[in-house]
Image (tube, rainbow, N blue to C red):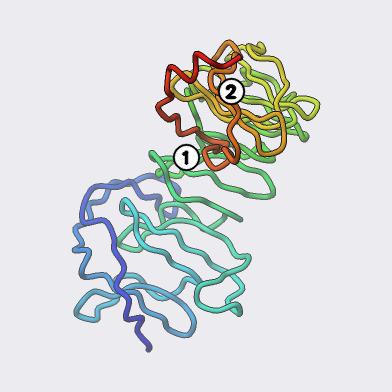
Amino acid sequence: MSLLACMLTIAGCGESNVMNDSGDSNSVVTEINPDDMHQIIENGKRGYIDKDGNIIIEPKYDMIEIFKDGLARVSVGADTTMGYYYRRGGKYGYIDATGKIVIDTIFDEIEYFEDGLARFKINGKRGIIDKAGNYVVKPLYEDLGFFSEDLARVKSDGKWGYIDRSGKYVIEPQYEFAYGFSDGVASVRVDGKFGYIDKTGKFVITPQFADAGSFLGGLACVSMGGDKWWYINKNGDKVYHEMDGANELFDFLRVWVQDIDAQKADTIK
């Protein structure tokens, strides 16, 4: 048996829900020192031992990642010929620090948990799952984003729309692309141009931009094309002159709004 010398960090202690073989959720308490967990490799499979060499998690996974908030992502059935750091294919799930399977290894893809939720893909469709293994959003969509201001963007039949937390469409799929809501509005693309809608789907700024970032603090960074960008307010008015290379400030998920010299802003025509 060969040992991986690198020590991996896990959650210290806490209570977590795990799914047993019958699908019932049980509560278990784990108390494991982060310094006691060391990854091992045996016959190409990965697991964990404690500092005394006792196996905590049997080496049976093609991939096992670091623990985060008491859970570690694992895979089975992956192509391991690409080396230690690369895996292709296989099925993914999550285990807790005792090795119990919390999220069954049935998913084609599953992301890290954020605020207790993770996006996943199964049978070509995407959804959102919680740490107890419950579907928060059923796998019905070609693509989707996380909830933002209680709405999630989803893609169905090539078009994007928005659902609420019950899975009901609030805005039917109709956009070429859509971003999450921020400051009460969202950037969407229609006929190749971006504009902004409110939570009823009504355009508050008509589609006219080549790129349009999220509103943050009342301003958004937009472009008419090329490498010229400027800030607009929620009325669609330009509040700062064109900036060269301002795409460095622009991010499709958020905009880092900087302090703007009021005197310069007053000179904008």
Residue highlighted by disc 2: 186
User: Whole-percent x and y of residue 234?
Assistant: 55, 14
| Labelled disc at residue 134 | 1
Give me the residue at 66% from left, 39% from top.
Answer: 227
Give me the residue at 63% from left, 17% from top.
Answer: 197
Q: Closest to the observer: 25 or 235?
A: 235
Where 266 falls versus 108 (above or below)? above
User: Is residue 180 in view from this perspective?
Assistant: no
> Image check: 1 left or right of 233?
left
- Quarter of the image with the C terminus is top right
Q: Closest to the observer: 197 or 3?
A: 197
- Quarter of the image with the N terminus is bottom left
> Image check: 37 left or right of 58?
left
Give me the residue at 34% from left, 74% from top.
Answer: 39
User: Whole-percent x and y of residue 133?
Assistant: 45, 44
Looking at the rendered structure, the kind of residue marked 2 is Ala
**Gap between marks 1 and 2, in whole Å?**
28 Å
